[in-house]
């Protein structure tokens, strides 16, 4: 069953009805009205038409961002009613110059000020309405009545033109799947920007409350969140109908909420210790998954053609708390690089390629070393290694963004120019980008 009209649809419907009824009444009663009454009614009808035109323009803008009907009017019928009103007004007497006859045999008066003076006497206007402010206003409206009539016809034509845009749009939307996809994307973007922040905060509060609820004691966080998903999907399946803009916003809310809940389940899993590589190499599952996603960026923009380069990729991952700093892990580091970062035809790295350059760090993070604090490096060695580390550091920091929280050499305050000016993650698809964002958010929490 279709829902009741929303507030905008109701205002638009009322505005159409009011304007058409008002115009029809004016056309039917025009010759019976007093001169001032004709002029005032014409101006009032023009104002109502302008208001309707403004609302219709808003309707066109709203519809341009929606795959469902947001207007709530029978567009063809409304266009027909307005065309009829336009025809009646064009063929009626509303364009006649306003005049006044104080008796059937008298010559008509056409001068606005004289008309007002005669009205004041013959029609017994109260004394305060015979004052200059009132009489000037009435005379002005009589003077401009024909101009207002012409403006009114233009206004009706504009409203009809806007209706025709909506009619054409509705036809195109039914026939063009690309346009429907574009509109659906626009609706999702509207929801994400305008409504999701509040809904997200409310949902996260519900999650936190469910995790603390005594009734859920003994259940794992994953089971609690899965139960929330099941309940939410059952409720949505029972209530949604996908017919109105609000329904579509509810659909967007449902999809975004389920996505967030599933992301929380993934986050719980990703925060767990990493079992790969004997559980000794990465600080968490999230760190391991992120390292794999960054692998091609390291391959493309740091390189492994010279085995020593791998040492500085690892140094950066250790400094960002992705890899555990343990001298006994070198065999596992080598296995990770050879198995998951290098191609089948690439020469494999060995333990010496990892160990030798980093020995000269004297146990300190490479990110703290620069030309003024070389540890055991020579200046020439540091100059050779600096660029490799800087690239690796910039790639990771571009994702996690916690470099400002680290104690580091001044040059690392800037992104390496090669990394800064390039989309180093263009090899990732949309799902991988989403996963990258989730992992980076989890890993960033370690630094907060």
Image (cartoon, rainbow, N blue to C red):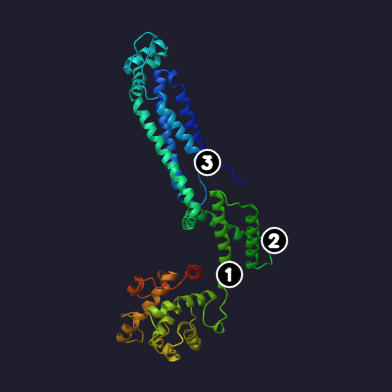
From this view, report whether residue 117 is shown above or below residue 145. above
Is residue 243 something one can see in this rendering? yes
The picture places residue 294, in percent across and down from the top left corner, at: 45, 76
The picture places residue 151, in percent across and down from the top left corner, at: 36, 32
Disc 2 or disc 1, which is closer to the eye? 1
The picture places residue 318, in percent across and down from the top left corner, at: 45, 79
SS at circle 1: helix
**Whole-Å distance between the Cαs marked 3 and 2?**
51 Å
Label at residue 215: 2
Q: Which residue is mark 3?
A: 74
Q: Is residue 300 left or right of residue 249?
A: left
- Of residues 135 and 437, the one nearer the viewer is 135
Determine crowd level at label 1: few under 14, some 14-19, many 20+ residues with C-alpha closer than 10 A: some
From this view, report whether residue 259 is shown above or below residue 97. below
Q: Are marks 3 and 1 in contact (CB under 8 Å)?
A: no
**Whole-Å distance between the Cαs marked 2 and 1?**
20 Å
Determine crowd level at label 3: few under 14, some 14-19, many 20+ residues with C-alpha closer than 10 A: few
Determine crowd level at label 2: few under 14, some 14-19, many 20+ residues with C-alpha closer than 10 A: few
Counting residues from the N terminus, which is met first, the one under dot 2 or under dot 1? Answer: 2
**Whole-Å distance between the Cαs marked 3 and 1?**
51 Å
Q: At 58% from the left edge and 65% from the top edge, which residue is drawn?
A: 262
Label at residue 268: 1
Q: At 45% from the left edge and 29% from the top edge, which residue is drawn?
A: 23
């Amino acid at each position: 069953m279709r829902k009741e009209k929303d507030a905008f649809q109701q205002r638009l419907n009322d505005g159409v009805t009011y304007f058409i009824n008002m115009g029809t009444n004016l056309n039917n009663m025009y010759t019976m009205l007093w001169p001032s009454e004709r002029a005032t009614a014409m101006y009032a009808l023009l104002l109502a038409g302008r208001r309707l035109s403004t609302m219709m323009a808003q309707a066109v803008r709203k519809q341009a961002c929606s795959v469902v009907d947001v207007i709530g009017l029978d567009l063809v019928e409304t266009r027909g009613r307005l065309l009829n009103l336009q025809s009646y007004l064009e063929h009626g007497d509303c364009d006649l110059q306003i005049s006044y006859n104080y008796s059937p045999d008298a010559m008509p008066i056409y001068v606005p000020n004289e008309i007002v003076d005669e009205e004041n006497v013959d029609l017994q206007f109260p004394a305060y309405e015979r004052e200059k402010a009132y009489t000037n206003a009435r005379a002005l409206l009589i003077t401009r009545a024909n101009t207002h009539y012409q403006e009114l016809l233009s206004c009706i034509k504009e409203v009809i033109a806007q209706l025709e845009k909506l009619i054409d749009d509705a036809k195109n939307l039914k026939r063009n799947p690309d346009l429907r996809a574009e509109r659906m994307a626009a609706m999702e973007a509207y929801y994400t920007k305008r409504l999701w922040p509040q809904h997200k905060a409310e949902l996260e509060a519900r999650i936190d409350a469910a995790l603390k609820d005594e009734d859920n004691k003994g259940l794992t966080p994953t089971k609690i969140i899965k139960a929330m998903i099941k309940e939410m999907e059952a409720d949505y399946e029972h209530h949604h109908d996908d017919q109105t803009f609000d329904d579509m916003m509810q659909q967007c809310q449902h999809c975004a909420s389920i996505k967030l809940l599933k992301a929380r389940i993934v986050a719980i899993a990703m925060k767990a210790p990493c079992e790969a590589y004997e559980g000794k190499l990465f600080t968490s599952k999230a760190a391991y998954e992120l390292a794999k996603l960054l692998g091609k960026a390291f391959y493309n923009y740091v390189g492994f053609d010279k085995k020593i380069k791998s040492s500085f990729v690892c140094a950066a991952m250790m400094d960002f708390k992705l890899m555990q700093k343990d001298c006994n892990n070198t065999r596992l580091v080598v296995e990770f690089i050879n198995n998951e970062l290098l191609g089948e035809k690439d020469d494999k790295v060995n333990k010496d390629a990892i160990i030798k350059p980093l020995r000269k760090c004297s146990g300190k993070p490479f990110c703290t070393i620069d030309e003024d604090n070389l540890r055991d490096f020579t200046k020439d060695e540091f100059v050779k290694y600096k660029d490799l580390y800087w690239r690796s550091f910039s790639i990771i920091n571009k994702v996690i963004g916690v470099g400002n929280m680290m104690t580091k050499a001044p040059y690392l305050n800037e992104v390496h120019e090669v990394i800064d000016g390039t989309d180093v993650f263009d090899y990732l698809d949309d799902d991988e980008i989403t996963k990258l964002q989730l992992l980076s958010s989890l890993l960033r929490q370690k630094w907060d």
